[in-house]
Image: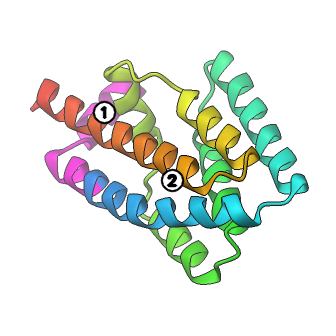
Amino acid sequence: EQTQTLEQMISTTVLEDYIIVLQARKAIERETTRLAAENITQEELDSIYRILEEQREKYRKMESVASSDISFHRAIAKASRNKVLETLYLMLFSYGQQTTIFEYIRKQVKAIYMTSHMEIYEALKKHDSELVEQCMIKHIDSLIEDVTKYWDLFY
């Protein structure tokens, strides 16, 4: 059973790693979203909207949304026009942040999905760098909260 293996793979070390990576992501992504709000093109906004549609569709079909999640954050990093921040973001993702384990953790704590991505998108559309930064911080904080909640439930 896949669920059982996932449970075995999740240890306190994994959870600590998730939190550390999420804290680093928060530092980087609050800045990439700020810059993206200033630099994003209509074409990029349309592309992000399509990513969110695809994500909604996958979620509805109970399929993994991890890949569209990566696409969403990656598109924002690219729109920031800061190559260094974009590279740092990609490096952090290579730590396996958006894996089936992470999705599993969020399901276990009944995390509400998608709302924060839509809020980020709407703020980007307004080119409001203050608002978009707040939305991203809120988004990453809620992910950290989910991991912490899981930790408290199971350890």
Q: Which amino acid does label 2 sit on?
A: Glu
Query: Which residue, given by chain and number where applicable, does mark 1 sit on?
Result: 146
Q: Distance between the residues labelled 1 and 2?
A: 20 Å
Q: Residues within 10 Å of mark 1 (few under 14, many from 20)?
A: many
Q: In this view, does 45 lie to the left or right of 94?
A: right
Numbered tag placed on residue 133 in the rendering = 2
Which part of the image, by quadrant, shows the N terminus?
A: top left
Q: Eyeballing the image, is 150 above or below 77?
A: above
Q: Is residue 12 left or right of residue 31?
A: left
Which part of the image, by quadrant, shows the C terminus?
A: top left
Which of marks 2 and 1 precedes in the sequence? Answer: 2
Q: What residue type is labelled 1?
A: Asp
Q: Which residue of the protein is positioned furthest toward the left in this rendering?
A: 155
The residue range painted magenta reads 1-17
Instruction: Identify the residue at image location x=61%, y=19%.
Output: 62
Q: Does the magenta stretch include residue 4?
A: yes
Q: Where is residue 79 in the image (x, y as percent from the top left)?
A: 72, 65
Q: In this view, does 55 lie to the left or right of 44?
A: left
Q: How crowded is mark 2: few (under 14 residues within 10 Å), some or many (20 or more)?
A: many
Instruction: Identify the residue at image location x=64%, y=78%.
Output: 82
| Residue closest to the eye, 110 or 131 | 131
Camera-side mark, 1 or 2: 2
| Residue closest to the eye, 28 or 124 | 124
Instruction: Identify the residue at image location x=69%, y=38%.
Output: 122
Q: Where is residue 88 in the image (x, y as percent from the top left)?
A: 50, 75
